[in-house]
Image (tube, grey):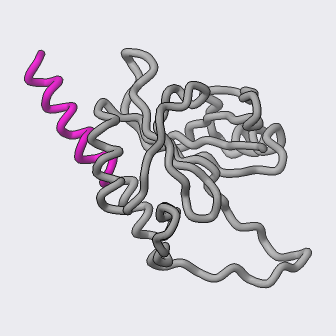
Amino acid sequence: MARSLRFRSLVVLLLVPTVALWAYAAGAFALQAPAGKPAAPSAGAVAPAAAADDAPKSLAIHYLEIVTADVEATCAALEKVHAVRFGKPVAELGQARTATLRGGGEIGVRAPLRPDEAPVVRPYALVDDLDAALEAVTASGGTIALGATPMAGRGRFAIYVQGGVDYGLWQK
């Protein structure tokens, strides 16, 4: 049992930051450098098109949540690789330690909130209308894991599962 738990912890320590860093390298999000240090453009970044009424909207990641068995090691690795600084735990984000994403969002690293919560990297996309977005999710075959939930001073969020992958939606 202890050996299995150590193996699982090792896999989580290697897999979760690797997935997050892969997404970063792919240009899905970018961490913001601390004050006084220039932030390099993310690889594969594309300049936004000129605004037009009929132009499609872009996907904005408002919050990137990493649930891991080792918060301190994960934060330390991300700090070293990206020259960012994670803050103290934030109660309303499940005691996640957060850093700023380039473009205004946040990345949060937290421990599981219950014994059966699996490690996950969950992006929360910013939406204008959370209720309409949840209807679109269910119409597309997704399953709502956590319905619209208010968070004082931060808006509302929800979690859904599509194709076995966790996603979040966030309305300010």
The answer to if 61 sits in the magenta stretch is no
The answer to if 15 sits in the magenta stretch is yes
* Residue at the image position 44 percent from the left and 44 percent from the top: 121
Left or right of 53? Residue 74 is left
Q: Which residues are magenta?
A: 1-18
Q: Does residue 164 appear anywhere in the picture?
A: no
Residue 32, given in percent of the width and then of the height, sits at: 51, 63
Q: Where the C terminus falls, by quadrant? A: top right
Q: Which residue, as the protein is rendered here, is positioned at the far front?
A: 36
Q: Which residue, as the protein is rendered here, is positioned at the far right?
A: 53
Left or right of 170? Residue 44 is left
Q: Main secondary structure of the magenta part?
A: helix
Left or right of 39? Residue 115 is left
* Residue at the image position 76 percent from the left and 34 percent from the top: 153
* Residue at the image position 48 percent from the left and 61 percent from the top: 34
* Residue at the image position 69 percent from the left and 79 percent from the top: 48
Left or right of 121? Residue 58 is right
Residue 51, given in percent of the width and then of the height, sits at: 83, 79
Residue 26, given in percent of the width and then of the height, sits at: 44, 69
